[in-house]
Every structure is written in C-alpha cells, then in structure tokens.
Amino acid sequence: MKDGSMTPYVDQLVEAFLQERASQAVFEQLFAISSCDPKQISVFVIAFMERISEGSTVLGTAFGLLAMENWDEVIQAAMKHLRSNPAHEGAADAIAYASLQCPDKLSSYVEELFRLQPNENAYYSAWFCRAAHEKDIEQWIHTLHDAEVNDPAFGHSLNALLEARTEPALRAVIERIERLHRDGSQAEAVRYPLDLLLEEAGYRLAEGELEQLHGNMAYHLVFRPEDFTAERPVWFAREQHPTWGLSPATPAADDRNETAMFGGRLAAPCSVCGQPIHRLLTLERIPDGVPIASLSRITLGVCLSCLGWEEGELFCVHDEQGEPYPHPSAAGTEPQEPQFPAEALRDAMIKLVPASGRWQTQDWALSNSRENLNRLGGMPSWIQGADYLHCPHCSEKMAFIAQLDSDLPTSDGEEWMWGSGGIAYMFWCDGCRVSGYRWQCT
C-alpha cells in the first residue's frame, strides 16, 4: 500500500502470530489471505519483518505463496533490515528463499550480500551467488588467490565461486585447491577435498574436463489427490502449495507433459533378501533433459525392505528394454531376512510436469514438508550434503536422475518413510546402464 499501512486482516494476522505463534488459526488465516487477495501476502511478509526479527514457519510458508511480481519489494525490505541488523533472521530467510525461487532478482545485491553475509553459518549461505555478475566472480577469484586459508575471506570466496557454478569460477577453485594441496599441510588437504567440493556444486572432474552430475531440466511427479489418504496438519496440506497442484492447464506446464507408472512390484528378486523388488517409476519415454541416453524407456526399482537398512546403497543393471535386475554387488551367500519388510508403493499413474523456473531448484529443509519434492531430473535436494554414487562397474560418479520424498502412499493404505522422513535419490551410469539408489534423512 502506498503509505505502507496494513490492511485490517493482515494486521490481524501479525497480531495473531505475536499472540499464538504458529497456531493452526494463524495458518488458516494466511491461506485465506492467499486465496482471496494474494497481493496481500507481500504486505504481510513486509509487516512481519518490520515487527518481528526472528524467522518462523509461518514466514517460510508465506514465501512459497508470494506472487513472483512481489518478490522485488520483499527483497528491498529485507535488505533494509539487513543493512541495520545483519542478524535479522526473517530478512536473512527472505534472501535464502529468494536465492531458490528467483535468484536473478538478487543480482543487483550480490556485492552487498557478500559483505553482509546474512546466513553466514548456514549451508545455504552462498546461494545468492547464483545471481553473480562477471565482475563479482573476478573479485572472488582474486580474493581466493591471495587470501590465507584461515582468513574468513578465503572461505567466503570459495563458497561463492562454487555456488556461481560458471566455468571460470570452478576452474579458479580447482587451481587454488590443487595449489593448496601441493603447498599446504595434510590437514588442509583433508579440510578441502577437491572432488567433494565440486560434488557439492554438482560437478566432477573427468580427465581434466568439468562434467555436470545432474541435468538442467526438472519435472515434478504430480499425484492425484485421491492417491493420498492420510490426514495432514493444515500447514502441511498438499493443496496449499503450488508444487502439488501443477497440471497441464497451468502456466508451469507445456505440451511435453508425460505420464509415468508408479508403485507395485517387479519380477526381479532382490540380491539381498531374494524377494521381488519394488517399482519406483516406469518411464515409457525418457523426458527431455534427463541424463539417460542409452535407453528409450526405463523402469527404476529397488527393494524398499533392504535399501538403507540392510545395505546403504543398491544397484540395478538394465537390459535393452530398460528393465532392472539387481546388481550382485550386495549379494551374500544366502538370502537374509530384512529387519523391516516393506509393502509396495501404491500403484498409480502420475504426471511428469516440467517445473517452472521458480521451482527448478528446491531444498528439503527450507521446504519444511510443504513442497512437492518428488522430482525427475534437475538438481537433487540433499539432506546430508552431496553424495553421488559410484558405478559398481566403472567406478565413475553417477549422474542424478530422480528423487522421491517420504509420505508416499503404500499398497496397504499407509505412507512410506525413508528413515525418519528423508528422501531417496536415484542415479544413472549411461555407459554401463546401471541405476543406483540411496536415501538420506536427519
């Protein structure tokens, strides 16, 4: 609003939060505002940051409901608070969410954010650097080259260059870390392992060439509402977040919409327990941008009973039709009884909807169970940090191809959890036609 005042219902929502914090009523009022007058979400976010410096689940929820055209004014308000108080949690959260949903809108603030370091101790501290200009990258390269390892500027510049993810930025990191390993102590070499640093940025170094470990095109796996039967709190309700409701009729989709078969069991026996493995996805056509070139169709499957419980990682070899057969690398002399026998995931035909620019990159922690993190292609949403599998045939790092979140429907009417509520990741070696599987949780 022109005078900066709040509408009555936004004022009431801020007051309700101050009195009740994250109560169900506060979330219900927030969703009501989003439905009847979505422009007021930005008014609420700005008012929240003005009166409350702490972060909140309510504020994080509001960032997901914020209209793209209103992000500029929210970023401006966040920057105002950070200039006077770099420890302002709500403003720092605004920068973190903007770094995911609209990094280009931060491009004019990169130099200032680098100086302020609003999320300095968080794993996402340098995400804003994805919007870096060439001059920013040149300055970080210069600092990384000259700074001592114990200088905070060294770590800040290193993280900034990794998140910038351009060829010059990554080459500068490679050159500096290789020099550090040559000239520094063993402790410094352990502290800065080059392959793991590049892996966090989604790259590997193969015979001197940088290779990306994931595709650039992401698809949401969109289920039908009736596929889920378990009750969820209002703040986690799937109909409340746009990533759950994508369909071919929405602007985020286009004429490349595909379907995939989800759930059920396959014929091939698990190499650990001997029971039939579980289907995750069958793609009758490999969508554009997914790094699978050696097959025209594929079925991804693994034993839910054994993955993560009996073996930390499992692999399958695929025949010419793309059907999976468990790799013998995990086989013992005799089949073993799994600790936690699993039902199959519930059979369903799901849609593969291209993710809009806003949701091309998602984060497990910041989504806080609100977003649809069931994805094909794009960047993985790591929980415990990047951990790409190595192919059991050629030993090369495998490319990320898909992930499945927890709370998936099972054939017995329950919901499947990866550990304590994590994500399962799927990887692919195109030369060997091998798929790999592992999950992470907190």
Image: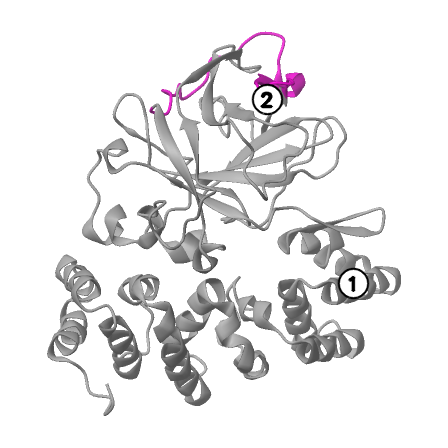
Label 1 sits on what residue type? Arg
The residue under label 1 is 171
**Residue 356 drawn at (x, y percent):** 44, 55
Q: Is residue 341 magenta?
A: yes
Q: Can residue 152 be seen in this view?
A: yes
Q: Image height check: is 28 above or below 77?
A: above
Q: Say which residue appears at 57% left-offset and 42% top-offset.
A: 288
**Which mark is on residue 322?**
2
| Left or right: 67 as drawn, with respect to 306 | left
Q: In which quarter of the image is the N terminus?
A: bottom left
Q: Nearer the viewer, residue 126 or 349?
A: 349
Q: Does the magenta stretch include residue 134?
A: no
Whichever of labels 2 and 1 marks the residue nearer the N terminus, that label is: 1
**Residue 160 drawn at (x, y percent):** 64, 69
Q: Say which residue appears at 70% left-offset and 76% top-offset.
A: 140
Q: In which quarter of the image is residue 232?
A: top left
**Residue 238 drawn at (x, y percent):** 27, 47
The residue sitting at the bottom extreme is 3
Q: Say which residue appears at 60% left-offset and 30% top-offset.
A: 436
Q: Is mark 2 on a helix, strand or loop?
A: loop
Label 2 sits on what residue type? Gly
Whole-angstrom CA distance, mark 2 to mark 1, is 36 Å
Q: What stretch is highlighted in magenta?
A: 318-346
Mark 1 closeness class: few <14, some 14–19, many ≥20 residues within 10 Å: some
